[in-house]
Amino acid sequence: MPYDYQLTVGSLLKQTVYRRGTGEIVYGKTRYTWSELFDRVNALASGLDSIGVKEGSRVAVVDVDTNRYLEMYYTIPMMGAVLHTVNIRLPPEQIAYTIGHAEDDVVMVRDEFLPLAAKIGAQIKSVKAVVTMSDSGIAPNSPLPNSHYYEDVARSRSNYEFPEIDEDTQATLFYTSGTTGLPKGVSFTHRQLVLHTLGIASGLADSAVRMNSADVMMPLVPFFHVHAWGFPYLAGMWGMKVVLVGKYEPKNILENLKNESVTVSDMVPTILNLVLNHPDAHQYREAFSRWKVIIGGAALPKELALTARKLGITVMAGYGLSETAPVLTLGTPKDEFRKLPDDQLLDQVLLKAGVPIPLVEIRVVDADMKNVPRDGATLGEVVVRAPWTTVGYYKEPERSEMLWSGGWLHTGDLASLDERGNLIIKDRLKDVVKSGGEWISTLYLEDLLTHHPAVLEAAVIGAKDSKWGERPVAVICFKPGTSATEQELLIHLQRFVDEGKIAKFWLPAKILISQNPLPKSSTGKLDKKPLREEYLNILVK
Amino acid sequence: MPYDYQLTVGSLLKQTVYRRGTGEIVYGKTRYTWSELFDRVNALASGLDSIGVKEGSRVAVVDVDTNRYLEMYYTIPMMGAVLHTVNIRLPPEQIAYTIGHAEDDVVMVRDEFLPLAAKIGAQIKSVKAVVTMSDSGIAPNSPLPNSHYYEDVARSRSNYEFPEIDEDTQATLFYTSGTTGLPKGVSFTHRQLVLHTLGIASGLADSAVRMNSADVMMPLVPFFHVHAWGFPYLAGMWGMKVVLVGKYEPKNILENLKNESVTVSDMVPTILNLVLNHPDAHQYREAFSRWKVIIGGAALPKELALTARKLGITVMAGYGLSETAPVLTLGTPKDEFRKLPDDQLLDQVLLKAGVPIPLVEIRVVDADMKNVPRDGATLGEVVVRAPWTTVGYYKEPERSEMLWSGGWLHTGDLASLDERGNLIIKDRLKDVVKSGGEWISTLYLEDLLTHHPAVLEAAVIGAKDSKWGERPVAVICFKPGTSATEQELLIHLQRFVDEGKIAKFWLPAKILISQNPLPKSSTGKLDKKPLREEYLNILVK
C-alpha cells in the first residue's frame, strides 16, 4: 500500500517540471525552458516507442553536445531503455565495435556522422532503426535503411506513458578505452545516477566553487564522456540554465561564456588551456571574473591554475573515473583552510584532487591493501567504495573481477594523501616508472618540466634499463618560437632536486624533443601508449 | 564481488571521520570535534553491546538536546538497533505507553527524568537495562534496577565492530500525538534517513538560506522531535560545527548564538517568538545579522517574520510532518523571484511553505484525488510521495492503510498552490471549519486576528450551528496590559473582508476572550482540541 519510491532518472526531473522551471536550455539559436524540454521528452518518448524502443532496448547516440543530447539523457532511461553514449573520438572500427558489443537496437546520428555510420552500418546486425539529427532544421538524406528524422520523431503525440522502473534497471552504457585491448563497456543503473546526482549536489554546494541552482552551467566535458561528469542530471534536478556549445571551438566557448552569463563549467585542463590561449581571450576579463571552473580528468597544472586565477577565474580540481560515474572527490577547503591566503589555498587545497564527496569511501593502499600514512609523500593505489560505482565491465567477467579485487574498486591511480585526507594523484599505476624498486611519478615530472618557459607539453615514460629495471625518459614539445637544450632542461629539473622536491634518481635518463604535438587520447588526455611503444628500448639499444 | 553499497546512517559519518573533521560539537562546557565524537561513538557502541544492545534491539532515549543525544543518533542505528526518541513533553502515562508499545529493551535517561522513570518503570516489562546520564559528570543515584552510567558505558574499549547493515533496516522510531487517541509510532529505515539527509543538503544549499558546511548550526527543534528535522545527520555528513543548548532557555540561546558565532537554526515560530521577545534581545543585533532561521511546524506569521527581518535575521519557511522524516518543501526563490524587493520576496515566497526539495512529489488534491488549480486560492489536501516517507504507523495496519490511501501519503493538511507551485498551508483538515458546505481556513483567520495590536494569540474553531453546520468561533488572548472589545476585533477583521482577502461569511460568529495563554501541544503548537471540546456547542446552547 505505501508507495515504493524508486530512485530513477525521471524522479530527478519531476521537481523541476513541478516548478515549471524557467531556467533555459540554450544551444546556438535554440532556446527553451526545462518545462518545454519535458514536453519534448514526452513527445520524443512517444515517437521512439512507435519506432520500436521498448524497456530494455539499447539506444546509441552519436552526437556532439546539443539540446537533443540533453533530451535523450532523460528520455531514453525514462523509457526503461539504455542510453549508450558513443565516444565519437574513437577510430571508426572501434565505434563499430562498441555499437556491436552493446547490441544497440536504435542509433541516433548527427548528420555529420552519417558517412561514418554508412561505413560501419553493414558490420552491425543488431540495429533496427536509425534516427538522424541536424542543426539545420531539415531532415538530412540518410544513406541508411529504416531512417527517421529526430524532429519528426519528437513531434509524436500518442498517449505514451513512461513505465514504472525498478531503480536497479540499467540506465546508461558507454565504453572506456584502456591502454591495451578493446574498449570496455561500463554501465550504470538509475539508482546509481540519482545517488551520484545527489552526491555531487551536496559536494559542489560544499566545495570551493560553492555551486547552487542560481549558477549558469556550460558543461565542457562531452556528453559522450562519463555523463559529462553528471552535470546534465544535476542541471535537471536544480532546473539550472544550461548553455551547450556543440563542438568545442574556443571562440564560440568564449562568446557563450560572455553572452549567456555563464558562471560554472567542468572540463579537462586541455580545454582550459585552449580557451585561455585563444588570441581574443583578453577581451573576456569580465566574463572570466564570474567563471568557476572545475578541473578533472587529469591533474590541474599549477601554471595553468595561476594563469586562470590571474584572469579572475576560480579554479578547483576534482577526481573520478569512468567506472565511478565519475565524481569521487572535489576540492573542499575546510576549517582553517578557508582562511588561507589565495596562493597557499592553491597549493594546499585547490591543486590537489580534493576530499571524498558524501558517501564516498577512499583509501590509498599498498600492495597488501594496508592504508599508507597521510604524509603527502608515500604512494599507494587509490581504491574506493561509493553508491555509484559500476558493478563491472559489460560482458567481461574476468576484468570485472580484477576491478573489484578484495571488495574495493581499484582505480589504477597512484596517489598520496596529505594530513587532511586531500588526495594527490601522482600517476597511473600503468604509467608509473619503477626504477630500482622505487616509484617515480611521471605526472609530477611532467608538471615540473612544463614550468620551464619554453616547454608546451611533456610526457615521461619508463624505458627499459638493464641496471635499474626502468629509467624515466621525457618527451617534450616546445612552444612556438622557443627552444632549450637537453642540458638546460636538466638544469631546470636539478633546481627541484636541490629544493628537495624530487629525488636525484628521478632526473630523466634522456630528454627527447618532439616537433609535433604529443599524442592525445579520444578524451583529449595525453596518450603515452605510442610513445612507450616507440621509446621502450631507447636506453638499451 | 562488487561491493554492495548500502545507504546507512554510518555511511553519512564516514566522510567526516575521513577528513578528521575539526568542526566542533559544543554543549555547555563540553567541546570536542567530530573525530572525537566518532571515537566516543565507537566506545559507546562497545559498551552498549556489553549490556545487551544487539541488532534489532530497541533503545529509548529520554533526554534534552545534549552532545550525548547526538552521539546516540549515530551509535544506536549504526549498531543495527532502533533509536526511539522519546517525546519528553508527553504526559507520563503516554510516555509509559510509547515505551511499552515500542517494547524497548534499554532506556537511556537524563537524571532529571529519573523520578518519572521510577514512576513508570513498573509498567514496562520489556526494559532490561537502564543507562543514566547527567551534565554533572557524576553518576546519579538510580532508583531503577540494572542501571549503568553513560560515561562508564562510553568508556568501554572492547573490540566491537559495527555490523554491516541492510539499508532497509529500521533505524529510528518515535511517536506522534494525534488529536484523538493514543500516540502513533512512526519509524524510518537507514535508507530513508540517508536520502532525507541528501535531499535536505541539496534543498538547503539551493534554498533562500543557501546553507553549506561553513555554517554553524544551532538546532532549536528538539532531538526527540522528528530527527530534529534532520539537522543532526546533515551536520555529521558535512562535519559542521554544532551548538547544542539543552533545554530551550531564551537567554542561553541568545548567549550561544553570540558566543559560538551561530549562523543557522531551525525552529517552530513559538521559539523564535520567545527569543525575540526576551528583554535582552536588543543586545544581540550583531549576532542576529548573521542568523538564518528556518521555520517549520506551523505557518510563519507575517508579523513575526517582519520583526525578525527588522532585527537583521534571515527567515524562511519549510514544511513537513512526522510521517515524512520530516522535510518536504523549503522556501526556494527561483528565477525572477530572486530579484524581488525584500518585502515582496517575503509575501510571494518566504511566508509560503516553499516548493518540494529534490525527489519529493507533492500534489494538492480534491476529494476525488484530482489536482486543484494553481490559483493561490482553491483549497485541497496535500498528498506526497518521497523516498523518505514512513511506510505506516507501527503496529497499526488500519491507520497505515488510511495514511496511504490511493498510493499517496495523506498529510491531513489543507493548502493552496500559487502559480509557481509554492505551497500555502491553510489549515489542518481536522481543524478546518465547514460552513454551509464551504471551507473556512482557521489558520488564516488566526493570523489576521494576531495582526491586531492587542492580540497575543488566537485560535479559531468550528462550533455547531443548526443552519450552517458549523460556524467559526475565535478564542483570543491579549498581550499584557492591552485589550479590545469583540466589536473592535470584528471591525479589524471587516477590513480584510473589504480588501477581498476573506469572504464575509468567514467572520467569526463569536469572539471569546481567554485570561490564560491558549493550550499548546507537547511540541509547542497551538492545541485546539480542548477549546473545541469546551466550545463545540456554544452557538446552539
Image (spheres, coloured by chain):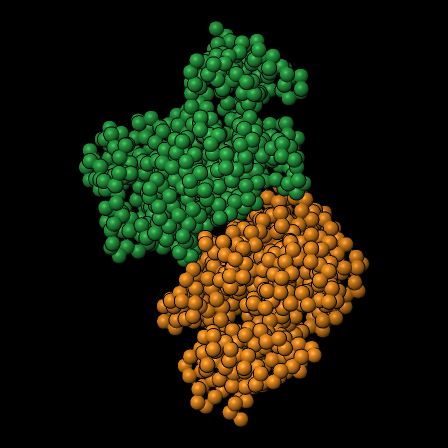
Chain colours: A orange, B green
Relative to B366, A360 lies left or right: left
Q: Residue at x 63, y 27 (%)?
A: B377
Q: Residue furthest bottom?
A: A541
Residue A463: image location, x then y, percent: 51, 85
Q: Nearer the viewer, residue A84 or A521?
A: A521
Residue B368: image location, x then y, percent: 59, 30
Q: Is residue A2 visible?
A: no
Q: Nearer the viewer, residue B352 or B98?
A: B352
Residue B230: image location, x then y, percent: 45, 42
Q: Is residue A32 visible?
A: yes
Instruction: Note whether B178 is above or below A327 in the view shown.
Output: above
Q: Residue at x 43, y 34 (%)?
A: B254
Instruction: Note whether B374 is above or below A105 in the view shown.
Output: above
Q: Residue at x 56, y 18 (%)?
A: B452
Relative to B264, B33 lies left or right: left
Relative to A220, B26 lies left or right: left
Relative to A490, B338 lies left or right: right
Residue A194: image location, x then y, percent: 54, 52
